[in-house]
Amino acid sequence: MSCITMNAHGSSRTRRYVALALIVVIIAVLLFPTFDALSVAGFFGDKTYLIILQDNAEIRSTGGLMTVMGVLTTHDGNIASLEYRYWNSSQQTGIVALDGPESFTRFFGVNAAVISDSNVQYEFASFAPKMRSDFYNVTGKSVDGIVALDLTAVEALMNVTGPITTSDGVITSRNVADRLHYYAGSAEGSDKTSLTSLLSTLTHDLFRQIRDASIPQKLALLGTLRTLEAEKHVLLYPSEGFLFRNAGGEPETRSGDFISTVDITLGTAKADFDINRAIDYRVALLADGSAVANLTISYANRNFWDYDVFSTTLVPPGAELVAAHNVTHAFKGPQVTSGEGLTAFSSRLIVAADANGSVTYSYKIPNIVHDTGIGHRYDLTVLKQAGVVRYVLNVSVHLPPGAKAISTENVGANMVLTEDAHISVVYR
Amino acid sequence: MNAKRGAIIGIVVVCVVGALAAVTFVSTSPASDIVYREPASAVHASLGQTTSDGKIALRLNEVSDGADPATNSTWISLNREAHDAPHMPVLLYCCSLNPSPEEANLVANITVTNVHNATTPFSFGDVVLVSNDGKAYYPNYVVCGSACTAQVATKALNATFASNLYVLFSVPESMHPAKLVWTASDPYIVISLT
């Protein structure tokens, strides 16, 4: 009991320090127009960043197809240099080794990929350090950090900063994603210079608008960025600065029961904005602290073309797959692999145009409930994949015979979520 | 100590209230709303009427909702034609005309003809849809037949170019289109939908 009290005081002191620091920043932003909150995080110092535009209309493990990469150097709060390259340009065809995850390398029998297709790790924090090293080995360019943002992030930022006029008309938050797709598909030449030129214009103008923004706009931008960070549309590596801590640069914490679905589309183009995802999870807790789970991952394909997806679901270590079935007209799997602190169930599905598809896994989980002293506690974390805009979550928890719930959190149906979800049940 | 604590609390309250007010102010004025300002020298035309600046002739045939079955069917078939045609830029399938909540997809069917007897620049990005409350909306995407896709992509229409273009606009659900404006001509060509 005394141990729990000490921990509570320690975390309370930390919260006070963070709150005081935040107050200082807010006061500075309000009183000093030239103060830039982002500079507090050190992002506008003399730094070189690898900027990755992840097209989350074509989902990949870390958030989307790495359509375009750029190297941005800042000096004294301004862009000193910026160079974008299209993903299959001659400068980016370097092959890099893939040492995992095993669920991907084993399923497809590959151990290497073009650098622009190498974001197959389960999360950005695992991918980013390798990417920094690979980028240096392929291009000879060293970067201080990596900033990955997807099209949802670009739309949200432009919704605050306003439209940008280019040589090809006006780009707004409403049309930026489709216009980038049009240029990616139609621009001539393997280097897609019209696409990279547009992105350079957007970056320079966005940067200038952010720097010159009014105080209310800067506050709105800060709020937007923190939302985008929480929803995993902006990812930063390494994590730095209290304003953007946990923006994907640190490994996900997986404890208790968890579900993390990581999808990779396979040649189905810009489909993911019209895929409705749902997770249905029914778990029966047993008296010995273990559980039997029934997990269904569903895809409603609203596109007029088929959707081909390699879907990996991460669950607790030691989970034992008992059965799997699917509702699609083409299916391969499931494959079961293990990683550090996880078990992975992987399948490949093709969901027909204007149709629904799903895969259901039934599995046992050992030692998933822990004693709290006043009862038993079950915790479930559902980790949203970076790049996915929203998903529907249905969770039901069945208690052991004779048990009664003391408290529940987020157990329910048809929850539409844009972030990770935390579910808990305390019972005795 | 109590006075100091009280002062800190006071500063916190002021800052939080000020910040919330500022964020609320900004968030209720979306930056994507753009007011359309029509120049006095614009040339006016009606729906179905052909107008030209001497190089490019335009005729607005229709502005329809992407949810309309006929519009959707045409959009899909032109996507397939562009995607499957040989020796074309690799246009990927785009886009399913399923709007986001509180949004709509409008498709402008425009006949574009080169009347210049020489290759002429043209960009679909210069076409603007104006609502009846004076807001401007800029195009998202364009599809047309296999004979026209490459030229529209390169923004250079050959001397014999004549084709229907289907230009996609993402707009608020409540938006009522009133005009289509071609801003690359001097003066602007303004086509009324009514």
Image (cartoon, coloured by chain):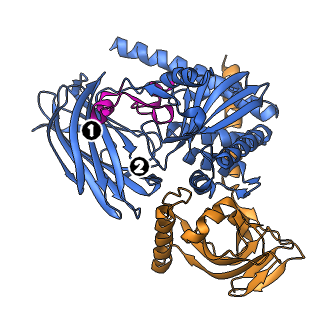
Chain colours: A blue, B orange
As measured in the structure, the alpha-carbon distance from the residue carrying label 2 to the one carrying label 1 is 18 Å
The residue depicted at 46 percent of the width and 63 percent of the height is B84
Q: Residues within 10 Å of mark 2 (few under 14, many from 20)?
A: few
Relative horizontal placement of residue A256, taking residue B168 as reference (left or right): left
Mark 1 residue type: Ser
| Residue A97 percent across, percent down from the top left | 42, 24
Is A43 situated left or right of A359 in this image?
right
Taking the magenta stretch, the answer to whether it contains residue B98 is no
Q: In which quarter of the image is the N terminus of chain B?
A: top right
Is B103 above or below relative to A182?
below
The answer to whether tags 2 and 1 share a subunit is yes
Q: Mark 1 — residue?
A: A346
Q: Which chain carries label 1?
A: A
Residue A129: give x, y in percent of width and height: 50, 21
- Residue B3 position within the rendered picture, expressed as x and y whole percent measured from the top left: 70, 21
> Residue A172's quadrant in the figure?
bottom right
Give the residue at mark 2.
Answer: A267
Give the mark nearest the N terminus, 2 or 1: 2
Q: Nearer the viewer, residue A236 or B174?
A: A236
Instruction: Report helix, strand or loop for mark 1.
Output: strand
Find the magenta span and give its range.
A100-128
Q: In this view, does B171 lie above or below A23?
A: below
Write down the chain letter for disc 2.
A
Residue shown at 45%/78% (left/top)?
B69
Q: Do the residues labelled 2 and 1 touch (CB within 8 Å)?
A: no
Outermost right residue? B41
- Single out the residue that lies furthest toward the left: A401
